[in-house]
Every structure is written in C-alpha cells, then in structure tokens.
Image: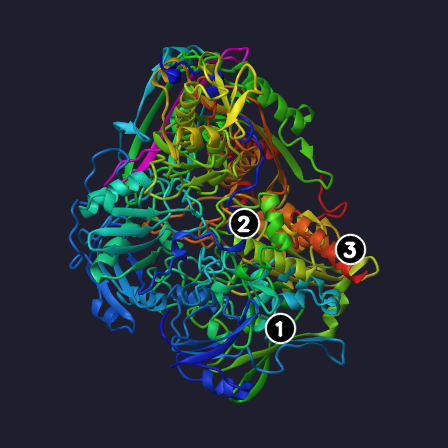
C-alpha cells in the first residue's frame, strides 16, 4: 500500500473540498478500498475519511412514506432494521446474501454503490485492463471469463458489477443523493453506474469530489413489499459473489400483475434493470408463461463475452424463479439462507 | 538372565487408561484464548519485517528491479536480489534425495513460474516492507509459458515420493479385450493449493553461526538438515520452535523457499527478521497438488465382476523438479480384478513444483476410480454398493498379499445403514426432496495406506514418580499434543497429569515427519517404546531387589499401572515407582524408544485404512446450484487413540472431499501462466454453510501387524472416497456425469 | 505525519501514536501492541481469521485502518476470558472440538460472540452456519463450531435469564 495523506474532515462540505484534489479518495469502511490498495490496484494519494461525518447514519421514513438511507448506514443495520425490511424485503435479503456478517457490519450503503468489479484481470496489476489503465486493453477478453458479462459489455471491458444490494435498489427505483462542490444533485440508481463503452475507467456519474450522502427508496416502491424477493445463484452456499442474481418485485392487482420490477446482478457492469421484462409482465397473470416471456425479454440482447454463454440460460432461469418466488409472496421472515436456492421454496414454485 | 528380554507381551501391550479416551485437546485453552503462539506471533526485540516480491510472468527472466525506489521508501532497510543475496553453502537447485525439493532463493534472474520470489525487501515496519516490494516494479523478458497438460509428456522414473511409475498384474490387454462389458472414461482434476489458514511464516535470528527459528513445520528434523546444508552450519547450531502449525496439509512438510529467504534476509541485515508470505504468495512457491488427467478402463463379466482394470495418469510437474501425483496407485488396492495395470506420465509446465497435499495421489486417484467404478456399476446394471461388494478385494489385488486387517465390509454396512442407502432408487434423476429439488445419493470407498516413518523418543521417570516424555512432534491440528500425550502417559503407566509431554521443538528427539497420516503411529510407537524401556529398567530394579514386593516376579510378569508396578498374577502386590526409585537411591531413569515400521510385517501384509462414504447431494433442477446435504462416513483405521480427535480428522478430510468435488481449483490464465484466483474469495473452499450434515462412524479394528500400538492413520483417508461419492451423487441427482473437477453449476446448466 | 488515537482495548484505554496511516487494526494489534491472538489469514477480508469486536460488532480487522478508529472500543480474543474463567463460547469450542489447528479459532470465537450479540440466528443451526460462513476453517471443524455456538448461546441466554430472575 502506498503512503497517503490522511484527512478527516468535519463536514460534508469539507470532505467534498478535500476529495476534489486529484488522487484523492473517500474512505468509508474501506472494505473494498483497502483491498484494492493492498493489491496495488488503486494508489490514492489522499484518503478523505468520512466515517465520522455527522448526519449520514440515519435510516429515515420520509413524510411521503419513502425511505432515506444515510450513506454511512452499515449494511447489517439496514438489513435488520425491522421497519425498513418490512417495506423493502428484497433489499434486506440482498444485503444479507452479500459477503459475510463481518463485512456487512463494516460496509456502508455509499461504499456498496462504489464497489468495484471483481474481474480477476482488473485485480491483477500485471494484466491489461482498460478500467485500471485506459487504453491498455482487456485481458479478460479471451482469458478466464467464465463469470463475465453477457449484457451491456463492450470490447473495452466485459467485467460485471459485484453488488447484491444495488440489484433490488435498481429494481425499486432508488435515487442516489450526491453532494459536490456545486451543491446537491440526485441521480436514479439505474443511471448512477455507467456501462463500459469505450471508457470503462469511468464507472459512475460522480465527478471528482462528489460524494454519495444518501440513497432514497420511493414510497411507491413499498407497494411491492408483499411480493418481492432477491435470488442469488452462487458457486458456494455462502460468502460468494453471485454468478447471476435477480431482484423481482410484483405489485399484484387482484389475480394479475399490476406492475413488475426486475433487475439482474452478475450479468453486466451495472445492476441491470430490465424494463422490457417489466413491461412484459404488466397486466399478465403470474405464472410460468409470463415469467418465461419476461426472462426472454430480459436477455433478448444478451450475448456471451467469452466462455460464459451458460450465464444467459442460467440468467433466464433465475429470472423465472425470482418472479415465481415473488409471486408466492414475501415470507414473514427472511430465510436462514437469504436469497439462496436452498432457502425454502413455496409449493408450486418448482415444477417437479 | 535378562528380565527385560523375558517381559511377557502382556506388559508391553498395556494400553487403555488414557488411550481410547475422548479427551479434549490439551492445547485447547491456549488456542481459544489466543495464547497459542504460531510462528508469526513472535516479535523479538529489534525485529525487522521482510516481504517477498514475486514474479508476474511464468517463464523468462527479470531484467530490472527498481531497487532505488524501494530503498528510498521511508523505513526500508535493504533490498535483497540475486545481485546481493548472501552466498549459500549449497546450491538451492541441488537434489540429493526425493524429499529434497529445489527452491527459488534468488540464485539468478530466471523465472520458472508465476509467483516465484524474485527479491526480498526488509524494513522497519511491515507497511514499509510491503510497499517497498511493490515499488520494485520488475520488468521482464517473458517467454511463452505452458500451464496445461497438452504438451509433450514423458514417463517418470518414480511417482510420489518414490513409487514405480507402472505396475501390472495379469494380462490387462487380453482381459479387457475379452470382457463382455467395458467402460472407458477420462477425468480431469485441477491444480489445488493447500491454503492452510496460517500462511508460511518464519522469524529467524542469527547469533554468530547459531540460528534460532520460529517456523511452522511438519518435519523438524528434516528442516534442520535442509537448513544446515543450505547455510553450512552444524545441525546442532539450529533451533527450530514449531509448537503449533496453523494447518499444514503437506505444504509445511519441507521448508519452503520463502521461509529460507527469511533466514537469508536475517543474515544479510544482521537482525531478527519476520517473513510471512501473503495469501496470494501461497499459490506458487509453497507446493500444491498437481493437475491430472486420468483415464480408466474397466472390463467386467456379465455378472459385474471386474476382469480388468487400467488406471493411467497424466500429471503435471514443474520445469525444474520432479513430483508426479501418484494417482493411479489407488487402483492397486481397492477392487479385486485379475488383471490390473497402472501407469503414469508427466508433463513439464511452468508452475511451482507440485508436492504432497493431503492424500497425494490417493485423493486424485480415488475421485477418478470411484467415479469410474460407479460408471461400471451402472454399465453392469448394478447398485453401486452391491457392485463394490461384489468386487471386494480379499487380498491386495496388485500384490496378492493379505491385508493386516480390513474392516471395510463393516464400514460399508454401518455407513449404508446410517445413511439409509437401502431406500435409494436406482435410476438417476429419480429422487426429489420435499420441495422438488433433485436429490442424488452416491457412495465411494475410502482408502489410505498405513504409513510409518522413523521417530525417536525419550522418557524420564523422576524420583517423585512423575514422568517426562519427549519427542519433537508436530501439532498441525490433528491433535498430536493430545493423542501423543495419551500414548506417552500410558507408556509410563501414569496419568496425563503426572506425565509432562514435551514436543514441537527441534532440540527434542526427532519425531519424524508429520505426514502420510503416519505421525501418531510413528511418534506414538517411539514414545510407547521409550516408556517400555523405562518400565523395563524399573522392573529390573524391583524384581531383583529382595526388599521389593515384586522380588522374583520376573517370570510371571509385571505390569505398570497408575504409577505402580504390580504383579501380573496378583495385582494387589506391587509398589509405587517413587518407592522403587527411592530405595535404589536413583534420582531418575531414562529410556529411549524408536518408532518405525517392521519390515518383516510389511513384507507379509498389505496395510491400509479403509472406509465407506455415502453422500447426498441436493441440486436445484433449474438453477443447478448444488449442496452436499448429507455426508456419512464409516472408517476402520486400527486402534483409535482419541475418538474425539479422530472424528475431527475424518470430518476435516470429508470436507476436503466436498471441496475437491465441488469447489477447489486454481485457474490459470493460459496466456500469462498466472493464477487468476490466487485468493480465498475466488479460490473456493467450503464455508460453514456448505456443510450442513456430516457424520462419522468409527469402526473397531484390531490390527496386530501394523505396529505394537495397532494404529494406522486417520488424517488423509477422509478426502478419499468422499469426493467420488459426491460426484456419483451429482450424477445420480441429475443424470449428468461430469468428469472434470470441480463440478460446478455451469457444468449442469 | 503522526496520528494520535485513543483506543479502549479489552477494557484498557490506551493512546496509540501512529507514524503511518497505513496500519490496519490487525497489524496494529499484532505487530505494534503484541496482541497476537488475532490472526492474519488472508489480509483481504476473505477468511475471517482477523475478526474482532469493534464497539461490540464483529468486523474484519484486516480491512480497517487503525487511524479511522479513534475512540473505538475493541475486544480481541485476549479480552474474552475473565482470568482463568473461559467465556462460554471458548469453553464450548473446546467441548465440541470446534477447531483443529487453532489458527482460525480466535476469529471464529470472536465472530461467534458477535453473532450471539446480534441475536439474529437463534438456535437454528442453518442460521448459525450461514452467520458463521464469514470464517473459513480449512481444517473443516464446522460441525463442532456450529454446535459450540448453539450451546454457548443457550448457556448465555440461560445465564442472563437467571440473572434477571
């Protein structure tokens, strides 16, 4: 790890000013940043420690019934906040399926959004990576790319975004509140992360010095509370990144789907909301036919970026299952293995 | 007449007051309070930190290191490269015997594998040394590496530590050609890395030409010998402390290159040096399990009886040294077939040299053989357990030798019953759990040879009747501090509290290597005999002394029990040790013992531990994620010294079986030769949630031939059988026979 | 630049002068404060061997910059037992053979103490396994670990009920 200046601002304004300098990075829990620094993937000259800033650690219910989550709220605190988990159960389930209890106790909401890809070539300073060194090339292309993107990738970058939390946030229309030297602005989560295009080094819409101060979930999203799940397929039962994941939420209108929300994880460089799939579900009766059509819609544009065609098939099945689980209703209590295929499956969901 | 020589075997065989008890670990309190000191927990005064810089190419040479940049970093004391590395007394590439592996100790600028040490940075703090190593920013002249098995191969002279590369009984070609039913299948197993939780570490201090070392090792004696050779100092000048290993699994059997670099660095800077490899650096210079491609051909009669079995292994070795995973050799022992042929070939690739990793050869060979046997069972239309029983080996098939003991049939029976095997439906994809997931049941046979090395022990009986037992044994988690203490106490006929047990240090008698599952048998036998030696001397003292109630008891025998010698024919007549010593005016009695296999018995018998493992795998029918929902193993491995510790060894081995079947694999980028998942986030080993149910059954087995203790070994057998059972269960659940390990959900989508 | 922080470690308040902001809590404990019970297994948040309690919550100390923890209350494995009296989790780990080599054990035990304090798993073995999955045990002592956590928790809740009564 390189030497750096450590600064500890007393206010968001001070933090933003301190982080506007070239080579500066915000330090929240550091569960990703320190990992990257230890690996020599990033070498910031200045760390701006925001962990002690006031007023960023609250989970609030807004007057309209929506939720506002301070950027420094710990993942575990959010997931186990009873009121929040009741209103946005898929978010809680996603949080609890991510990383480990220790990491969730440290990692923050803002930090989670800023998580960087686990692409092995990004993590290996000896490999070419356009994200690390623009123009260097992408060694993941033609390399070990079993886990790489099938949606939204480019010839510059085929990495995927690793977050679980962001997937239901994308599905439920979360808004990111950002503070910068020019004041505050808001960006929908789905527009917060950028697809690689020809500039995979540009990962989010944040400008230098800009800082996430909160994430908001609209009140409208609470209308999906009764039917929402997060499903995460993994190569190990726990403590593993998603191979493919999905957050599915339904607002039931009698026997039909009034509205649907669907986002995917592990398939693209951003949490991938599929409005096409959502449209395919609206007004339909919940069931295999509608879910399969939604899955096809979600992956209509998918193509393998390497040795990963299986993720397209798998992704469709994940969509179908996540929708089926959502249709069966949010369980009263999160399962022992959150988001796992080995969590209890309500009757009729698996077609034996 | 010598009383010692006439001691009846009844006295020699006394065992049981401590042996066989499920005692909790003697080192338990130290380990749960954080007071057990592992090598890197030592912080002597004036300590400097050394960090290794490693190669990012797999083949070529280092052309430049920015030593100036590293040295300019605040806190950096020195940088060691091939240009300034202090001379060694021995070429690190010298090789005098198969247990001597070539090491990369900065002998030149050549790079032979990715992750090879190319420099060492020494600094006042760990942070400075770490950054110093990064600042070296090496440049290379890279050549195209090869890291797969597709290149040119050769037939090695030996496989494993010294077994022949081929063996044959009967005429395989004829028998296979004439068999009415045949199967042929090829299985791939990946490179695997031990990944003990404790990374290889060393704290080294020089005092003139005396060297004091804290270092985890599974072989104190061999480490001393290797270090003495490398540094040209007498063995007695070297003291290694290794009271606890944070896991070894074979990777700490022999000193690792980075540990030796720590010693050289300490010499260079003239201060104590701590060097701990990073997790990433454990994927290269500290050994691994080589990849294999195994082809099995099985021929059967119409009745399913095996007529011919061929097991061929192609395995990786490094460009610069030899270790070939002896995977085919499991087929020597497991199933009866009149014609058996086993062969090996090797391919040289640009990797660190493979070596001994938990059940080297047996684990890889077992997963292929057990899969192939399952395929054969289905080809014969038979239940896989029935097929195994039909082809049960009453004698060792390759040699025709009888087994010293073999309670495998009982293992099959007990484990099958506990598992509920009789309720299995034959057809694949025919079982479901209550929620509709696919369920598969598979079986595998476990096998591991009863290996012994050579060990020495010293026993002392003190005037107060208490004892001291010493052997430089190694506790890497198997429970040596406990099990050997139990044997030691029994050897002196004392309680464990009355017996001080000293271990884990090179200034004690050499306990041999903690490997091959042979440590308890070997070091235990040495302790047992050292105790026997003391008791014999004490007995002689007593039976020749007119004032002793044991006077003249030599012919009927004397037994040592609870700190007393008593007549075997009348246990009420006896005397406390302290009294015997006091009357004789002797302050202490010292005894010595050696542990080793009996060559005559080895010639006569095949000696192996056996087991049967049943696995239930549950698979999501759409999402294809798998979970080993139940694992039941029954094992027969001779006498059980401590059932609690033995069970834990089986559990651990079986969980390694889960890992082999479904998780572990180092993934190389074939272009660069680098391992792309050299960490614990992407190189998966099972976590707690992967092990919902595991059960072991200890099957009683008396073995009068393996050694006087009747102990075989339990450390490695658990992985064998299990990995195959799981693969077979995946097949049974899904109807998909995956022949490349680990089996992943992507294989099933 | 020097950074002065104050930490309460196992109940004792101490001032720590940091000459380097790069020092993690893990390396601070092990290399500078001689509290070597906390172990380094991966240094990257991938194994859990370095688990400690910070303000009562379990975290990976390898991914925590010490300088950021001014004022924190830290509990390590050394701070669990009261003299010779083991913490119930420690005792249960011995009784259930919840370890072999012992290297991951301090992290497992601190994680278990944290888990019990979180109160989310109850006595459901599946929840305990999931909640303990951030602590890798290469020896494979998971069965004993799970049993130990459940037993210790029962013991602790029983004791608490006793106190209340």
Are discs 1 and 3 less than 8 Å apart at CB?
Answer: no
The secondary element bearing badge 2 is classed as helix
For image coordinates 49% across by 57% down, the residue present is C46
Identify the image quadrant of the N terminus of chain B.
top left
User: Mark 2, mark 1: which one is toward the viewer?
Assistant: 2
Tell me if residue C63 comes above or below residue B690 in the rendering. below
- Does any portion of residue B231 appear in the rendered image? yes
Quarter assignment of residue A326: bottom right
Q: Which residues are magenta?
A: B297-326
Quarter assignment of residue A84: bottom right
User: Mark 3, mark 2: which one is toward the viewer?
Assistant: 2
Q: Position of residue B347 (x, y in %)?
A: 29, 36
Quarter assignment of residue B410: top right
- Of the pair B439 and B642, the residue shown nearer to us: B642
Which residue is label 3 attached to?
A285
For image coordinates 25% across by 39% down, the residue present is B321
Q: Position of residue A270 (x, y in %)?
A: 54, 65
Between disc 1 and disc 3, whose residue precedes? 1
Alpha-carbon neighbours of circle 2 within 10 Å: few (<14), some, or many (≥20)? some
Q: CA–CA distance between discs 2 and 1?
A: 38 Å
Which residue is label 2 attached to?
B29
Identify the image quadrant of the C terminus of chain B.
top right
Number of the label disc, if any, that sits on residue A73 = 1
The secondary element bearing badge 1 is classed as loop
Q: Position of residue A12 (x, y in %)?
A: 55, 85
């Amino acid at each position: 790890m390189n030497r750096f200046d450590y600064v500890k601002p007393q206010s968001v304004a001070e933090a933003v000013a301190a982080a506007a300098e070239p080579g500066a990075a915000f330090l929240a829990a550091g569960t990703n940043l320190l990992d990257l620094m230890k690996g020599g993937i990033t070498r910031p000259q200045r760390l701006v420690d925001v962990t002690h800033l006031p007023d960023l650690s609250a989970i609030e219910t807004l007057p309209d019934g929506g939720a506002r989550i301070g950027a420094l709220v710990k993942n575990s605190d959010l997931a186990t906040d009873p009121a929040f988990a009741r209103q946005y159960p898929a978010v809680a389930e996603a949080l609890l399926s991510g990383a480990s209890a220790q990491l969730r106790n440290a990692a923050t909401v803002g930090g989670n959004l800023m998580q960087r890809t686990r692409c092995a070539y990004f993590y290996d300073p000896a490999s070419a990576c356009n994200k690390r060194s623009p123009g260097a090339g992408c060694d993941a292309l033609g390399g070990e790319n079993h886990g790489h993107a099938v949606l939204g990738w480019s010839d510059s970058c085929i990495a995927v975004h690793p977050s679980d939390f962001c997937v239901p946030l994308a599905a439920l229309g979360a808004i990111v509140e950002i503070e910068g030297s020019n004041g505050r602005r808001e960006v929908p989560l789905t527009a917060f992360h950028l697809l690689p295009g020809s500039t995979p080094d540009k990962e989010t819409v944040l400008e230098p010095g800009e800082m996430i101060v909160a994430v908001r979930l609209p009140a409208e999203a609470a209308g999906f509370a009764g039917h929402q799940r997060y499903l995460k397929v993994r190569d190990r039962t726990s403590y593993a990144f998603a191979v493919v994941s999905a957050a599915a939420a339904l607002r039931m209108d009698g026997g039909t789907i009034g509205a649907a929300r669907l986002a995917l994880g592990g398939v693209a460089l951003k949490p991938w909301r599929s409005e096409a799939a959502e449209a395919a579900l609206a007004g339909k009766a919940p069931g295999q036919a509608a879910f399969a059509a939604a899955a096809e819609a979600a992956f209509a544009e998918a193509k393998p970026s390497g040795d990963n065609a299986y993720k397209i098939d798998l992704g469709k099945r994940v969509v179908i299952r996540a929708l089926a689980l959502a249709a069966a209703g949010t369980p009263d209590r999160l399962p022992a293995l959150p988001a796992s295929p080995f969590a209890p499956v309500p009757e009729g969901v698996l077609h034996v | 007449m010598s009383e010692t020589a006439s001691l009846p075997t009844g006295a020699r065989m006394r065992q049981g007051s401590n042996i066989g008890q499920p005692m909790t670990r003697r080192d338990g309190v130290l380990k749960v309070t954080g007071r057990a000191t592992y090598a890197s927990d030592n912080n002597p005064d004036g300590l400097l930190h050394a960090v290794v810089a490693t190669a990012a190419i797999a083949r070529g040479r280092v052309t430049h290191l920015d030593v100036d940049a590293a040295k300019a970093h605040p806190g950096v004391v020195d940088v060691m490269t091939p240009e300034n590395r202090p001379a060694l007394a021995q070429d690190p590439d010298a090789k005098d015997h198969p247990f001597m592996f070539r090491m990369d100790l900065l002998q030149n600028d050549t790079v032979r594998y990715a992750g090879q040490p190319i420099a060492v940075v020494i600094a006042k703090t760990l942070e400075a040394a770490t950054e110093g190593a990064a600042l070296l920013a090496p440049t290379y002249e890279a050549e195209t590496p090869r890291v797969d098995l597709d290149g040119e191969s050769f037939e090695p002279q030996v496989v494993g530590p010294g077994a022949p590369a081929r063996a044959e009984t009967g005429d395989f070609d004829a028998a296979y050609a004439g068999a009415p039913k045949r199967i042929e299948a090829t299985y791939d197993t990946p490179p695997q890395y031990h990944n003990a939780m404790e990374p290889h570490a060393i704290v080294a201090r020089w005092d003139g030409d005396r060297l004091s070392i804290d270092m985890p090792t599974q072989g104190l004696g061999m480490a001393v010998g290797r270090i003495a050779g490398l540094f040209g100092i007498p063995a007695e000048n070297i003291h290694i402390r290794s009271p606890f290993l944070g896991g070894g699994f074979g990777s700490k059997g022999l000193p690792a290159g980075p540990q030796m670099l720590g010693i050289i660095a300490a010499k260079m800077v003239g201060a104590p040096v701590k060097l701990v490899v990073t997790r990433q650096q454990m994927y290269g210079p500290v050994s691994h399990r080589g990849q294999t491609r195994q082809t099995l051909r099985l021929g059967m009669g119409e009745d399913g009886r095996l007529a011919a079995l061929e097991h061929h292994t192609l395995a990786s070795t490094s460009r610069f040294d030899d270790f070939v995973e002896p995977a085919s050799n499991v087929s020597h022992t497991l199933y009866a077939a009149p014609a058996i042929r086993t062969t090996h070939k090797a391919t040289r690739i640009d990797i660190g040299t493979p070596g001994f990793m938990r059940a080297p050869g047996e684990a890889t060979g077992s997963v292929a053989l057990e899969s192939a046997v399952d395929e054969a069972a289905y080809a014969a239309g038979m239940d896989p357990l029935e097929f195994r029983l039909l082809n049960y080996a009453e004698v060792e098939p390759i040699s025709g030798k009888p087994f010293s003991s073999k309670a495998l049939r009982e293992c099959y029976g007990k484990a099958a019953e506990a598992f509920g095997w009789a309720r299995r439906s034959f057809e694949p994809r025919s079982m479901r759990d209550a929620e509709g997931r696919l369920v598969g049941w598979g079986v595998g046979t476990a096998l591991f040879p009863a290996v012994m090395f050579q060990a020495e022990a010293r026993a002392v009986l003190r005037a107060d009747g208490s004892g001291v037992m010493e052997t430089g044994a190694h506790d890497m988690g198997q429970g040596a501090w406990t099990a050997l203490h139990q044997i030691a106490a029994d050897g002196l006929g004392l309680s464990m509290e009355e017996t001080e047990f000293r271990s884990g240090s090179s200034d004690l008698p050499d306990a041999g290597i903690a490997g091959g599952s042979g440590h308890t048998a070997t070091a235990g036998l040495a302790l047992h005999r050292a105790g026997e030696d003391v008791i014999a001397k004490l007995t002689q003292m007593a039976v020749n002394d007119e004032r002793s109630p044991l006077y003249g008891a030599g012919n009927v025998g004397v037994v040592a029990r609870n700190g007393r010698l008593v007549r075997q024919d009348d246990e009420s007549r006896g005397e406390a040790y302290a009294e015997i010593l006091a009357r004789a005016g002797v302050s202490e009695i010292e005894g010595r013992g050696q542990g080793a296999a009996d060559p005559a018995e080895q010639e006569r018998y095949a000696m192996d531990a056996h087991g049967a493992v049943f696995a239930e795998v549950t698979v999501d029918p759409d999402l294809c994620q798998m979970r080993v929902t139940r694992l039941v193993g029954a094992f027969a491995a001779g006498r059980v010294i401590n059932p609690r510790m033995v069970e834990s060894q089986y559990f651990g081995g079986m969980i390694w079986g889960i890992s082999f079947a479904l998780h572990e694999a180092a993934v190389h980028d074939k272009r660069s030769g680098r391992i792309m998942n050299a960490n614990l986030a992407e190189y998966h080993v099972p976590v707690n949630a992967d092990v919902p149910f595991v059960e072991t059954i200890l099957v009683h087995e008396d073995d009068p031939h393996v050694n006087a203790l009747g102990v075989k070994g339990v450390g490695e057998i658990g992985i064998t059988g299990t990995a195959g059972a799981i693969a077979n269960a995946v097949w049974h659940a899904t109807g998909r026979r995956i022949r490349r390990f680990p089996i992943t959900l992507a294989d099933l989508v | 630049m020097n950074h002065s922080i104050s930490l309460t470690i196992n109940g004792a308040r101490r001032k720590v002068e940091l000459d380097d902001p790069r020092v993690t809590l893990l390396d601070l404990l092990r290399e500078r404060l001689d509290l070597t019970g906390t172990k380094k297994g991966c240094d990257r948040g991938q194994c859990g061997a370095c688990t400690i309690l910070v303000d009562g919550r379990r975290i990976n100390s390898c991914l925590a910059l010490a300088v950021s923890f001014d004022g924190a209350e830290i509990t390590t494995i050394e701070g669990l037992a009261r003299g010779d009296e083991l913490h119930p989790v420690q005792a249960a780990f011995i009784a259930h053979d919840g370890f072999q080599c012992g290297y991951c054990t301090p992290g497992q035990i601190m994680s278990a103490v944290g888990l019990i304090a979180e109160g989310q798993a109850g006595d459901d073995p599946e929840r305990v396994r999931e909640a303990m999955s951030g602590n890798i045990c290469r020896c494979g002592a998971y069965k004993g670990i799970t049993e130990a956590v459940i037993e210790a928790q029962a013991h602790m809740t029983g004791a608490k009920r006793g106190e209340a009564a």
